[in-house]
Image: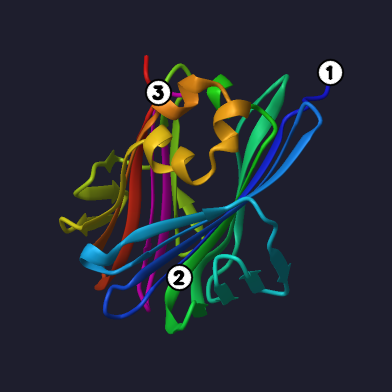
Amino acid sequence: MASSFSLIKWYLDCVTDEGEVTIVYLAELRWHGVHLHLASVVGGIEESMGTRSSMSPCRLSSNGGRICAEHAKLGVLGIWEADATAVERTVYENGSGYVRWNCLQPRSLVQLRVKDRELTGLGYAECLTLTIPPWQLPMRQLRWGRFVSPEDSLAWVDWQGPFSTNFAIHNGEETKLNTVTEAEVRFPGATLTIERGLALRSGRLGSTILPGIPALGMLLPSSLFNVEECKWRSRGTLVTKDRGSSGWVIHEVVQWSV
């Protein structure tokens, strides 16, 4: 029987050379006849970080290595130009559906306007498609992150629970992960060292997401909002056998309650 659940979630980010970060989340949820558009912008620098959310739809196009996103209510207009090869992977699948990760732009050249601020920098873009409700996934902990420098792109997924998998994509090539922590990511032939960074969002989803989109509290199971999320922006240095490069890391740990 086909799943009635569908969640398409876009994640688009940009970090300027100075470290000012903007993350744009755009999602479309269909479930039991309900059709919702969700949007959120996390942005700022140091103590001025903030989150704004909306349930109004946005304008989004993805074509030929260019992603354009505009959300009038949140005051966001951005263009992400691909600067690395896209990678797509089915992360999990069962008889009910799948989780598909499409890393469209492991490294992006970004031009962004947020309200009255004009920002440029390197960024990252992915689209995650779920046809299984996230509270039904066999997962206890997820570590995700991305590192972008002028020389390298790196993205990683470490899924642990009744079903476990991990992998990294380094400059378009998939590899296994050896170690993943808040301070370090190791994979064969390379190590990413992550400095202590700026907390972008920390706490239960009920306190970080629900206040901005209260309608979700009436639609989704309460257990989902007890999930703990910590997300950071940090400086990182990737060292391989041949060279090293420095750039910005955005990484997170998501913990499901047992």
The circle on residue 123 is: 2
Q: Is residue 257 shown above or below 5? A: above
Give amino acid for label 2.
Answer: Gly
Residue 256, quarter of the rendered image: top left
Residue 89, quarter of the rendered image: top right
Q: How much space separates mark 1 and mark 2, taking CA atoms?
A: 39 Å
Earlier in the chain: of badge 2 and badge 3, it is 2
Is residue 224 among the parts visible in the rendering?
Answer: yes
Residue drawn at point x = 55 percent, y = 21 percent = 221
Give amino acid for label 1.
Answer: Met
The secondary structure type at the circle numbered 2 is strand
Question: Badge 3 local density, few (<14 within 10 Å), some, or many (20+)?
Answer: some
The circle on residue 1 is: 1
Q: How much space separates mark 1 and mark 3, taking CA atoms?
A: 26 Å
Specify the segment rendered in magenta: 139-158
Residue 83 in the image: state x and y as whole percent: 53, 76
Residue 80, quarter of the rendered image: bottom right
